[in-house]
Amino acid sequence: MKITTFSAFGSRNYRLFFSGQSVSLIGTWMQKTAVSWIVYSLTHSSLMLGLSLLVSQLPSFLFSLVGGVVSDRYNRYLVLLGTQIASMVQAVALAILVLFVHYTVWEIFVLSAVLGIINAFDVPARQALVYEMIDDKKDLPNALALNSSMVNLSRLIGPAIAGFVLEKLGDGTCFVMNALSFVAVIISLLLMRLPKYIEKQHTKNAIEEFKEGFAYLKRTPSISYIILMLALISLLVLPFSTLLPVYARDIFKGTASTFGILDSAIGLGALSGAIFLASLKPGSNLRKVLAINTLVFGGGLVFFSHEGNYPLALAFATIAGFGMMSQITVSNTLLQTTADPAMRGRVISFYAMAFFGMQPFGGLIVGSVSKWIGTPNTLLGEGIFALLIGFMHFWYLQKLKKNDAEKPPGSEPVLQAV
C-alpha cells in the first residue's frame, strides 16, 4: 500500500520550503512565548494579554485583503521573500529594544503591530505559493497537513526552549534567536527552482479585484461557510491561549518553564492532529473530520479549565491541541482545493481575516470576561462554544447530504472530501 503521509516531499521546492520554515517557526514560537511572558510579567493583567493579541493580529485583519490582492496580482515568490526579510528586521528591532533600551509594554505592542502588518502580506503569498511548489497537485492536501505538522512541531519545541532561555539567558536572547532563524527560510527560498514568473495582464485595478473577491465569496456558499465557522472559532475559542500565562503563574504557581511546557503540550496535541490529518486516505470526508475534532477541541478545553492537577491538565491541553488542529488545517485544505486558482490568494486572505482577524477581538473579550468571572470559568465557556460549533458542523453536513439527495440524476455532487 502506498504511504501517503509524506508524499508532498517528492517535490524538491516543497522540501526546501519545509526545512527552512521548520527552523524559522521555532524562532517565531520562541518570540511569541517571550512576548506573552514579558507582557504578563510587566502588567500582571489578563486584559493586557488580550490587548497584546489585539495589537499583534488586528493589523493582519485590516490589511489581509490587500495582501490577498497583492498575492494574486504580483509575483508571490518575491512577495514572500520580502515578508521574510521584513520579519527578520522586526525581530532584530525587538532584540535591540529589549537588550539595550529601558522599554515599556507599549513599545513591545508597537513592534508586535508591525509584525501583524507584515503577516497580512505574508500569509496569502505563502499559503498560495505552496500550490506552486507541489509538482503533483494531488499532493496538495498532504502538503497543507505537513505544513500544520511543521507549525505544531515548532510550537512543541519553541515554547519549551523559550521557557529555558527566559530563565537562564533572558528574554532578549529569545528575540536574537528568532532573528537568526529567518536566515534558514530565506536561504531555502533562494535555492528554489520555480517556473519563470509570467506577469499577468490586469484588466481591472486593485480595487475592482478587491470587490471581485467579495463577490466570489458571496456566490460560493461552500467556501463562505468554512470561513464563517473559522471566524467564530477564532473569536470565541482560539483566544484561550492568551490565558495560559495566568494558568502557569497563578493557578499552577509556576515559572516561565511551566508556561513553556503548558504551551508545548498544546503543540504536542496539535502536532499529533496534523500527523493524523496527513495520514488520512485520499477521499476522506474532511468536513466530518472537522466536525468531530471540533468536539474534541471543546471537550479538551472543558476538562482543562478547572483541572488543578498539573499532569492531568497537560493531558487535557494535549487533547485540546489535537482537536484545535483541524480548525486550521482542514479549513485551509478545503479552501485551497475548491477555490478558483485565479481567486486563491484572495480566498486565503479571507481565511487569514477569519483566523488572525477575529482572535484579537476575542482576546479582548476573553481578557475582559476573565476579570469578572475568573480564568477557569472563562476557559470553560470557550470549551462550550467549541462544542456548539462542532454540533453546527454536523447540522451542516446533514444539510449537504439532504441537498445532494434532492439533486436530479447527472447533476454535480456536493463536494464532501478532497
Image (cartoon, rainbow, N blue to C red):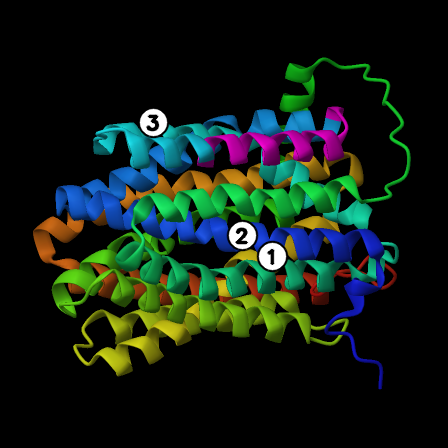
Does residue 415 show up?
no
Seen in the image, is 21 located left or right of residue 372?
right
Does residue 110 show up?
yes
What distance separates the C-alpha of mark 3 from that of mark 2?
Answer: 21 Å
In the rendered image, residue 260, in percent from the top left (x then y), is placed at: 33, 63
- Residue 357 colored in magenta in the image: no
- Element class at badge 3: helix
- Residue 83 colored in magenta in the image: yes
- Element class at badge 2: helix
- Element class at badge 1: helix
Tell me the amino acid under the disc marked 1: Ser
Q: Residue furthest left?
A: 372
- Which part of the image, by quadrant, shows the C terminus? bottom right
| Secondary structure mostly taken by the magenta-highlighted segment of the chain | helix
Residues tagged 1 and 2 counted as in contact (Cβ below 8 A):
yes
What distance separates the C-alpha of mark 3 from that of mark 1?
Answer: 26 Å
The disc at residue 22 is: 1
In the rendered image, residue 355, in percent from the top left (x then y), is placed at: 48, 46
Tell me the amino acid under the disc marked 3: Val
What distance separates the C-alpha of mark 1 from that of mark 2?
Answer: 5 Å
Q: Nearer the viewer, residue 269 or 225?
A: 269
- Relative to 173, say whether 77 is above or below: above
- Relative to 209, say whether 77 is above or below: below
The residue under label 3 is: 110
In the rendered image, residue 61, in percent from the top left (x then y), is placed at: 46, 33
Residue segment shown in magenta: 73-91
Tell me the amino acid under the disc marked 2: Leu
Q: Residues within 10 Å of mark 2 (few under 14, many from 20)?
A: many
Q: Residue 384 is drawn in which quadrant?
A: bottom left
